[in-house]
Image (cartoon, rainbow, N blue to C red):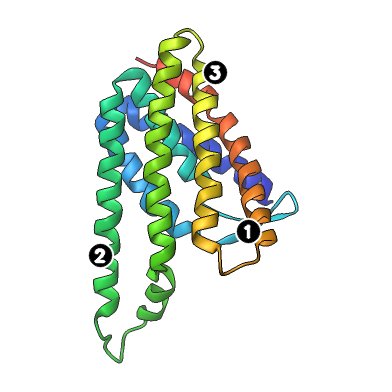
Amino acid sequence: MNIILGFINIVVIFSLVVLIEKLFKKEGLYVWISISLILANLVVGKAIDLFGFTTTLGNSLFASIFLATDIMSEKYSKEDAKKAIYMSICSSIIFIIITQLTLAFVPNKTDIVNESMKTLFGISIRTFIASTLMFFVSNMFDIHLYNKLKEKYPNKLWLRNNIATIISNCTENFFFVALAFIGIYDISIIISIAITKTILEIIIALCDTPFIYMSKKLK
């Protein structure tokens, strides 16, 4: 069941990226990237079993950000793609500030949502810093690499899309897992988590290629 839902999840999310760019151009992608970063950091808390491995949700949303910045680099400009990342970082920081202030309020005795909000919005500062840092670095690297490959191989969209996304996504994954979990889990467990997530992210990254072609052809 999870495999079927996972495939549907990828198709729906990547289709929404193409649709929102079709409807609202680069401004739509600005909004998508900011929302996706916030949502991904929320749903990543849910663990699931997939292909016999334990993983977390959020991979498709994170991957959609790479797809969105690649579309921006392809159809608009490198500077537009960078601006989208800056905006999403600001949105994420604002979200964290507001939710943490909300949790700081003492609830009324009739309150029924505070404990659930603690579970959903509670964060580890170390994890947040690691996630934000690697998100910024990996996406900036993706934008830079994509545009370099575009200059060198202007007629090979599939090549620059896959190489830039896979290298950036996998690098982000390994460094994030290391920064977030060293000292908490054994090295063997950390490597196992990183490898499992990397395999899944490579599969998802390969799936986004038809959607960037679709986006480029839609007028």
Instruction: Give amino acid for label 3.
Output: Leu
* Sequence-first disc among 1 and 2: 2
Nearest to the eye among marks 1 and 2: give it: 1
Residue 83 location, x and y as percent? 25, 35
Residue shown at 34% from the left, 26% from the top = 72
Nearest to the eye among marks 1 and 3: give it: 1
**Measured Cα–Cα span from mark 1 to mark 3:** 30 Å
Count residues near mark 3 (Cα–Cα under 10 Å), then give few for <14, some for 14-19, many for 20+: some
Q: Which mark is residue 97?
A: 2
* Sequence-first disc among 2 and 3: 2
Q: Is residue 155 left or right of residue 184?
A: left
Residue designated by label 1: 190
Count residues near mark 1 (Cα–Cα under 10 Å), then give few for <14, some for 14-19, many for 20+: some
Residue 46 sits above or below residue 12 on the image: below
216, 165: nearer the viewer: 165
**Measured Cα–Cα span from mark 1 to mark 2:** 29 Å
Instruction: Give amino acid for label 2.
Output: Ile
**Where is residue 30, by image quadrant?**
top left
Residue designated by label 3: 159
